């Protein structure tokens, strides 16, 4: 944790506790179960392409049949999902491009095709076992994945009986067989030929477009910005469009990617987990995305602990940390108890103006402003109020009520009921109404200065 002494004329860059002598640890942040992250799964080993797969923190394996894996399995896709869910309530995983589906033919009559593309399909195996308890000609069809039985279809006779019965395999007649062809026993046949998808920029762009219809907070991109520079450009453009044109407050989280933008965050180091797994800065972008989506607008993620982390990967020196903050980077450091924490909850904005002051780089401030915009949009839909003096008075009353609610929660302060939510009567006419709204956003105490005088 940063510390040392301070001067009244000079502000510190790093969050910390500064003490002068003359002759701390942050509380954890509660996870917002409504916070959601969109997470693209590039080069996925299995799963449906061009579909948002909803993964809820309360039941993370509810979609195990679609992904083919448990969230807790040792797999690069599952690791990204796990790290994201450490901070938020929901992940929308998306596989932009499908790979080839694994296939097999059992005997000469039954064709088996993996439900989804990807190399994991090569670990699927189908066996057909006689079911003597039911009667002659009846079989149980057993599907296993990586040696573990995942499905049993009991008491079937014909190929047609298998139609739509499996969550892992699509069955069909092969060769001259038909749906009426009887099944035959098979000791077990493995599927082959499954391959992982090759990234398509067009498919990725389609995902970005379709995400406009989702309710989510953060877009995570846990991949190399150098390798996928075109995708980074597309994401930046899309989140700006969401914020400026759609009225959808979305933040994008990258790794080692300066953006100088309030809607983009830049992660520049990683962590080492308790089981010695090294989480690169790209993978750590998932935790930052989840933590950002899951944080309340009345809380900061500064000094929030990284669950399950025991060390910082590529820790920064004090001088490097100061430079990183000035460069708009979010990174991990240690607190005084040697816990791994988020150093400073900021976005990548580094160019400050009269319209976007230094406060605009603080993510708590941005979350508060986003929350106010969301509530205002919900309370002021088109064609609800009359555009006259009576309607203006009603709208002003509702608006001040909204600001008072946010003040009661500690998100803003010093609300002036006579001045902070006013209709601009000189400009409002016809079907157009203009408002002037003023808010003083409450920030967190992240740089604390003490003067201790000896007596």
Image (cartoon, rainbow, N blue to C red):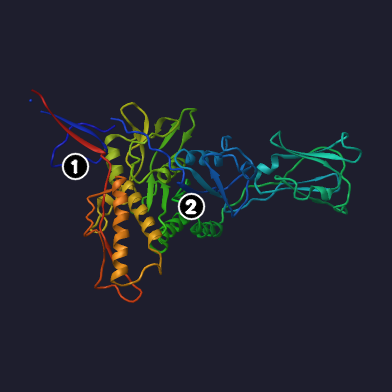
Residue under the image location 52 percent in, 41 percent down: 81
The image shows residue 286, relative to residue 272, as above or below, that is below
Residue under the image location 59 percent in, 55 percent down: 50
Taking the image as shown, residue 324 lies to the left or right of residue 80, namely left
Q: Quadrant of the C terminus?
A: top left
Mark 2 is surrounded, within 10 Å at the Cα level, by few (under 14), some (14 to 19) or many (20 or more) other residues, namely few
State the image quarter where residue 318 is shown: top left
Dot 2 or dot 1: first in sequence order is 1
Q: Quadrant of the N terminus?
A: top left
Q: Is residue 338 visible?
A: yes
Q: Nearer the viewer, residue 246 or 361?
A: 246
**Image disc number at residue 228:** 2
Q: Residue furthest front?
A: 390
Q: Is disc 2 placed on a helix, strand or loop?
A: loop
Q: CA distance from mark 2 to mark 1?
A: 38 Å
The image shows residue 123, relative to residue 171, as above or below, that is above
Q: Nearer the viewer, residue 239 or 388?
A: 388
Q: Is residue 434 visible?
A: no
Residue 120: x and y in percent read 66, 42
Q: Which-is-in-front pick, marks 2 and 1?
A: 1
**Image disc number at residue 120:** none
Number of marks drawn: 2
Q: Residue furthest right?
A: 136
State the image quarter where residue 2 is shown: top left
Q: Is disc 1 placed on a helix, strand or loop?
A: loop
Residue 74: x and y in percent read 57, 34
Q: Nearer the viewer, residue 325 or 115?
A: 115
Residue 251: x and y in percent read 40, 52
The residue carrying mark 1 is: 11
């Amino acid at each position: 944790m940063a510390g040392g002494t301070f001067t009244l004329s000079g502000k510190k860059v790093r969050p910390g506790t500064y003490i002068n002598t003359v002759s701390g640890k942050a509380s954890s942040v509660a996870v917002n179960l409504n916070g959601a992250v969109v997470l693209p799964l590039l080069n996925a080993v299995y799963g449906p392409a061009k579909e948002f797969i909803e993964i809820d923190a309360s039941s993370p394996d509810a979609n195990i049949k679609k992904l083919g894996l448990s969230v807790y399995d040792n797999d690069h896709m599952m690791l990204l999902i796990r790290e994201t869910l450490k901070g938020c309530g929901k992940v929308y995983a998306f596989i932009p491009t499908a790979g080839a589906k694994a296939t097999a033919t059992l005997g000469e009559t039954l064709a088996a095709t993996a439900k989804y593309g990807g190399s994991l399909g090569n670990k699927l195996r189908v066996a057909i076992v006689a079911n003597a308890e039911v009667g002659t000609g009846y079989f149980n069809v057993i599907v296993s994945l990586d040696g573990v039985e995942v499905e049993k279809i009991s008491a079937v006779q014909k190929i047609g009986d298998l139609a739509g019965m499996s969550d892992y395999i699509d069955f069909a007649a092969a060769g001259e067989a038909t749906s009426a062809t009887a099944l035959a026993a098979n000791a077990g046949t493995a599927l082959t030929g499954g391959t992982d998808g090759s990234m398509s920029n067009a498919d990725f762009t389609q995902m970005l477009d379709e995400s406009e219809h989702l309710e989510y907070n953060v877009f995570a991109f846990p991949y190399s910005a150098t390798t996928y520079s075109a995708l980074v450009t597309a994401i930046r453009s899309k989140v700006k469009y969401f914020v400026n044109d759609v009225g959808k407050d979305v933040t994008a989280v990258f790794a080692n990617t300066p953006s100088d933008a309030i809607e983009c965050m830049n992660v520049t180091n990683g962590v080492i987990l308790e089981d010695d797994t090294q989480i690169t800065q790209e993978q750590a972008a998932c935790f930052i995305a989840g933590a950002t989506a899951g944080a309340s607008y009345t809380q900061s993620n500064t000094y929030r602990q990284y669950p399950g982390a025991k060390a910082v990967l590529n820790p920064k020196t004090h001088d490097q940390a100061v430079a990183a903050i000035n460069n708009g980077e979010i990174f991990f450091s240690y607190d005084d108890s040697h816990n791994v924490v988020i150093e400073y909850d900021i976005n990548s904005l580094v160019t400050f103006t009269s319209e976007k002051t230094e406060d605009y780089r603080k993510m708590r401030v941005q979350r508060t402003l986003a929350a106010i915009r969301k509530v205002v949009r919900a309370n002021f839909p088109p064609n609800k109020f009359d555009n006259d003096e009576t309607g203006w008075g009603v709208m002003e009353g509702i608006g001040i009520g909204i600001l008072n609610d946010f003040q009661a929660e500690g998100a803003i302060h010093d609300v002036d009921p006579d001045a902070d939510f006013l209709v601009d009567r000189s400009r409002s006419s016809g079907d157009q109404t203009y408002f002037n709204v003023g808010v003083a956003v409450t920030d967190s105490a992240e740089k604390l200065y003490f003067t201790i005088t000896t007596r």
